[in-house]
Image (cartoon, rainbow, N blue to C red):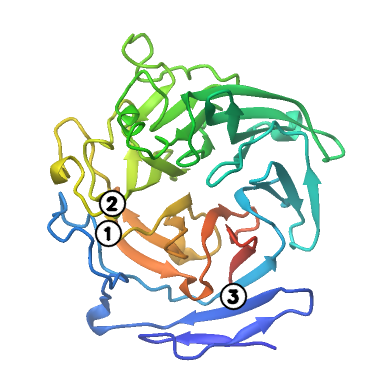
């Protein structure tokens, strides 16, 4: 049964394409939305938690809305992933997907078959912990090495750790797994591990580490002798990457690339090689940042959010000398997780930043020009899913995994 959706100012007609195999469902979306003078309001309609907070510059929040004009298909190609967290493509187009409880799944390109990869270190999977992100070695075709982040249980609590190992030839296990880096200090908590991994063009690894959420650990985001609340840059062996901004400075850990972060679950490189980060704020103040080496992004001292109780943080300070402003922020929160810059077949989306949202239950598309956000669109809101990670597929399609265990495929019609 095939359906199409024609979108004018609102979605007028809904049509569903259900394939003959399993639970696969395709929605074809045709957007023809236009408004007077071609301008759309920002998609956010809720009141701000902090209406008295003023952005530092025009376009820092609630920019003009945009609407995709090209038709595209939305399809669930697998519904049995369990609790996925991170996703990458293997060289042949299959998917390698982490499972929070402590293993990975290899899923066929069409989503129809799943096999399990085991042999990983023990994880602490309570709440936000578990086996989290995954990245392939840039030379994976030759060395079969993969890297992952996980919440490592140890005496006194746990911490974000980075592991690596070789995918066995039969793809059933990880050979010689080892931990190459630990984001200490250890803390007895269950939140804010950060945990994204991104390789740069030189084969070094960016790692995000959260500040572990609690009031007592919050100051560690500003503590440059702690790894919490940081973006780190390490070699494949877990050592400080050459060229890191604080190498040789005794007041800073040499792996630190930037600091003052809350819960950075999104990292992505744009077409020019710039590093972008997305982090969850408290109640409001979710941020997208352009990460520059050695810079302080303010968390603990500066935010556009408030405490969950409603109290202001640091007397409502939103700007402070010596700290970087976010390129963009949301209030109320949308709880972004994995992010990617789109490189696929939809020309309208080229180089746009795609953000998977958890409590926001959507994928957000940001149009960025000259490092400023100039347009925002909310995609797949009707699915009511917590989108944990997004992926540029090798086939030119966009993929996303959800906390409900689904693998979505978004493709040009």
Does residue 250 sit above or below 360 in this rendering? above
Question: Position of 401 compared to 269: left or right?
Answer: right
CA separation in Å, label 3 and label 2: 36 Å
**Image location (x, y in percent) of residue 255:** 44, 20
Image quadrant holding the C terminus, namely bottom right
Nearest the viewer among 164 and 91 is 164
Question: Position of 160 compared to 289: left or right?
Answer: right
Does residue 295 sit above or below 49 in this rendering? above
Secondary structure of residue under mark 1 = loop
Residue on which disc 3 sits: 413
Residue on which disc 2 sits: 285
User: Which residue corresponds to the image point at 54% horizontal and 47% vertical from the top-left?
Assistant: 127
User: Do tag 1 and tag 2 residues touch (Cβ < 8 Å)?
Assistant: yes
Secondary structure of residue under mark 3 = loop
Mark closer to the chain start, 3 or 1: 1
Does residue 359 sit above or below 312 in this rendering? below
Which mark lies nearer to you, 3 or 1?
1
Nearest the viewer among 100 and 208 is 100
**Image location (x, y in percent) of residue 61:** 24, 58
Image quadrant holding the N terminus, namely bottom right
**Mark 1 surroundings within 10 Å by alpha-carbon count, few (fewer than 14), some (14 through 19), many (20 or more):** many
**Image location (x, y in percent) of residue 201:** 52, 32
CA separation in Å, label 3 and label 1: 34 Å
Quarter holding residue 218: top left
Task: Identify the mark at residue 250; answer none if there is no mark.
Answer: none
User: Which residue corresponds to the image point at 33% horizontal and 55% vertical from the top-left?
Assistant: 368
């Amino acid at each position: 049964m095939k359906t199409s959706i024609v979108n004018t100012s609102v979605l007028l007609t809904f049509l569903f394409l259900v394939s003959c195999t399993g639970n696969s469902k395709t929605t074809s979306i045709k957007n023809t939305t236009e408004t007077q003078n071609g301008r759309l309001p920002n998609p956010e309609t809720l009141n701000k938690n902090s209406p008295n907070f003023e952005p530092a510059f025009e376009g820092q929040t609630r920019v003009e809305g945009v609407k995709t004009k090209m038709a595209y298909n939305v399809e669930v190609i697998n519904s049995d992933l369990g609790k996925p967290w991170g996703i990458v493509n293997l060289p042949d187009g299959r998917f390698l997907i982490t499972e929070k409880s402590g293993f990975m799944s290899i899923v066929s390109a069409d989503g129809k078959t799943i096999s399990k990869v085991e042999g990983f270190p023990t994880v602490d999977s309570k709440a936000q912990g578990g086996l989290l992100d995954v990245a392939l070695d840039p030379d994976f075709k030759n060395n079969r090495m993969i890297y992952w982040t996980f919440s490592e249980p140890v005496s006194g609590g746990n911490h974000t750790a980075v592991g690596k190992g070789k995918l066995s030839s039969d793809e059933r296990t990880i050979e010689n797994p080892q931990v190459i880096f630990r984001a200490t200090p250890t803390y007895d908590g269950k939140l804010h591990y950060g945990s994204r991994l991104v390789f740069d063009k030189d084969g070094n690894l960016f790692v995000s580490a959260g500040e572990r959420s609690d009031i007592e650990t919050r100051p560690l985001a500003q503590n440059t002798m702690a790894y919490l609340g940081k973006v780190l840059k390490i070699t494949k062996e877990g050592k400080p990457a050459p060229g890191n901004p604080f190498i040789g400075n005794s007041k800073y850990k040499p792996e630190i690339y930037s600091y003052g972060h809350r819960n950075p679950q999104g990292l992505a490189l744009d077409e020019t090689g710039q590093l972008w980060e997305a982090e969850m704020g408290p109640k409001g103040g979710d941020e997208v940042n352009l990460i520059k080496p050695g810079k302080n992004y303010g968390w603990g001292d500066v935010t556009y959010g408030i405490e969950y109780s409603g109290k202001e943080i640091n007397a409502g300070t939103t700007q402070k000398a010596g700290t970087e402003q976010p390129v963009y922020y949301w209030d109320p929160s949308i709880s972004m997780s994995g992010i990617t810059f789109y490189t696929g077949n939809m020309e309208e989306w080229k180089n746009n930043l795609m953000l998977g949202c958890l409590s926001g239950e959507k994928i957000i598309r940001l149009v960025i020009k000259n490092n400023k956000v100039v347009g925002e669109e909310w995609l797949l809101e009707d699915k009511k899913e917590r989108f944990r990670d997004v992926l540029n597929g090798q086939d030119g399609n966009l993929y996303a995994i959800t906390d409900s265990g689904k693998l979505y495929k978004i493709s040009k019609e």
